[in-house]
Image: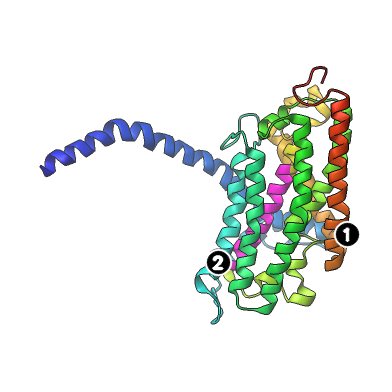
Amino acid sequence: MANSVTEQIQGLWNSDFSVAYVQPTAFAGLHVLEFVVPLIIAVAYLTYAERKVLAAMQMRQGPNVVGPFGLLQPLADGLKLLAKETIIPSGANRGVFLFAPMLTFLLSLVAWAVIPVNAGWVVSNINVGVLYLFAISSLGVYGILMAGWASNSRYAFLGGLRSAAQMVSYEVSMGFVLVSVLLTTGSLNLTAIVDAQHPFWVSLMLFPMFIVFVISALAETNRAPFDLPEGESELVGGYNVEYSSMTFALFFLGEYSNMILMSGMTSVLFLGAWLPPFGISALAVVPGFIWFALKVCFVLFVFIWTRATLPRFRYDQLMRLGWKVFLPFTLVWLVFMAAVLLYNHALPGMQGG
């Protein structure tokens, strides 16, 4: 009896299971690694690029000792953090304390499942990609909030609460920005958004929303001048003040991965992703993923440039900008755009668009 059951299992493995499940799963895993491995390398060297750009703007050298031109500095930083001891405060909630940085880093990777880096180069080309991205970016605050609460520290807890309030303030404006893009494309699919064709005057109408989206992305990723959850001068480091070694590194990686994610979203929604700039056909000889990477690098440079230029906002200034400036502006501009597109029969699916 046992032999017959074993033979049946082996037969199932050799016929149906191996063909219908194992091979597609293996290919899917390799497809995911094609995105994850370059992303992790990009995160590591984004820290190097930021230090070099900030140094150039402040007339300093930046990393220049470890390896040629300091190129091995990210590797040295990673090894240093990996070798350090993970210290857990005695009053902390151990499980939540360790899970929070893993959640933050995981969400920053999962969101890339729907980002197309070239025509057909996407892990999952779902029809609700915009909603998926909006949901994942909204969940990112939970890692920071959990870290602040689980640390059993007033400083960390205040940093977590600041991040929650900051996310709520700017998510609404980002939602209106996304709706304005959907008005011009008529699709929630990110590939369809890139391929959508519309007149040049429609792109000009989207430009104010582009500015709002970039500023909101700074606030969403807790970057200067909106890095209130990490206010060193008043919170001694904020939500991650009690973290060390690889738990701290995961927060660090999550922040920079979110920067790349927001830059990728900006490229897809407003800059044409893999398409040549300004629709110049002569530039189509350059591979699409190169254009996507260059546009992402441009937005990342704006992130770093802003950090080197502007001082940190006060918390009341942060809230006023989100609730009294961006929210009414995006709402009014969205209604204005809808009216203009309707009047000119330029809405998706209308004749004469």
Direction top: furthest residue: 351
Residue 130 visible to the viewer: yes
- How many angstroms separate mark 1 from mark 2 (CA)? 32 Å
Q: Which of 133/214 is in front?
A: 133
**Left/right of residue 244 with respect to residue 334 in the rendered view:** left
Report the amino acid beneath label 2: Leu
Q: Are marks 1 and 2 in contact (CB under 8 Å)?
A: no
Magenta span covers which residues?
A: 247-265
Display colour scheme: rainbow
Q: x and y percent of residue 316 in the render?
A: 85, 67
Q: Secondary structure at mark 1?
A: helix
Which is the main secondary structure of the residues drawn in magenta? helix
Of pointers 1 and 2, the one earlier in the residue sequence? 2
In the drawing, what numbered circle is on residue 142?
Answer: none
261 in magenta: yes
| Quadrant of the rendering where the N terminus is positioned | top left
Report the amino acid beneath label 1: Thr
118 in magenta: no
**285 relative to 205, above or below:** above
- Which residue is painted at 38% across and 36% down in the image? 21
Q: Which of 103/120 is in front?
A: 103
Residue 76 visible to the viewer: no
The image quadrant that residue 179 belongs to is top right
In the drawing, what numbered circle is on residue 82?
Answer: 2
Q: Secondary structure at mark 2?
A: helix
Q: x and y percent of residue 153 in the render?
A: 64, 78
| Quadrant of the rendering where the C terminus is positioned | top right
- The residue under label 1 is 309
Q: Which of 67/50 is in front?
A: 50
Q: Residues within 10 Å of mark 2 (few under 14, many from 20)?
A: some
Q: x and y percent of residue 245 in the render?
A: 58, 70
